[in-house]
Amino acid sequence: MIRETTCKSWGQFKELLAGQIYGGEPAGRRDFLFRGHGNSNWPLAPSFDRAFVDFHDRGRDKLEDDLIENFRKECEAEEKYRDILSDDIQTLALA
């Protein structure tokens, strides 16, 4: 399930994101890599949405759920990821 949150400022968004991904620990920031677009005119859309734009909503949602579940199964062998895999936001950040 996707939780929607409205932020009143960029600072509030960054604070919320940092808390969700890093758990308030600044050392965790080294573990993630973020990248942006090469052109500011490109719309912000996940690569999944761009790749499966022609899928109907239900089919795309099921495919997304299946891919996330497969990702979780592959990561279960790695003990260091087991706590993360129970949280959807952290799992997506890892993926």
Image (spheres, rainbow, N blue to C red):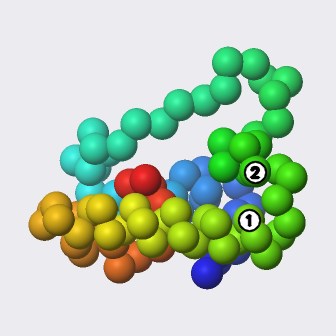
User: Residue 48, image x and y in percent?
Assistant: 66, 49
User: Residue 33, image x and y in percent?
Assistant: 40, 36
Residue 90 seen by the camera: no
> Looking at the image, how many numbered discs can be counted on the residues?
2
Query: Which image quarter: residue 86?
Result: bottom left
Q: Is residue 73 above or below residue 27?
A: below
Residue at far left of view:
79
Residue 32 seen by the camera: yes
Q: In this orientation, which residue lies closer to the viewer: 10 or 63?
A: 63
User: Residue 44, image x and y in percent?
Assistant: 76, 40
Q: Are marks 1 and 2 in contact (CB under 8 Å)?
A: yes
Q: Which residue is mark 1?
A: 60
Q: Secondary structure at mark 2?
A: loop
The answer for how far apart the CA atoms under marks 1 and 2 are is: 7 Å
Tell me the crowding category of disc 2: few under 14, some 14 to 19, or many 20 or more residues within 10 angstroms, Cα based. some
Q: Is residue 90 above or below residue 94?
A: below
| Residue at figure coordinates x 72%, y 44% from the top left | 51
| Residue at figure coordinates x 54%, y 70% from the top left | 66
Left or right: where 12 falls relative to 26: right
Q: Which residue is mark 2?
A: 52
Q: In this orientation, which residue lies closer to the viewer: 27 or 80?
A: 80
Left or right: where 88 falls relative to 82: right
Check the picture and name the quadrant holding the N terminus: bottom right
Q: Amino acid at mark 1?
A: Arg
Q: Secondary structure at mark 1?
A: helix
Q: In this orientation, which residue lies closer to the viewer: 46 or 11?
A: 46
Q: Amino acid at mark 2?
A: Phe
Tell me the crowding category of disc 1: few under 14, some 14 to 19, or many 20 or more residues within 10 angstroms, Cα based. some
Q: Is residue 83 above or below residue 7?
A: below
| Residue at figure coordinates x 55%, y 52% from the top left | 14
| Residue at figure coordinates x 66%, y 73% from the top left | 62
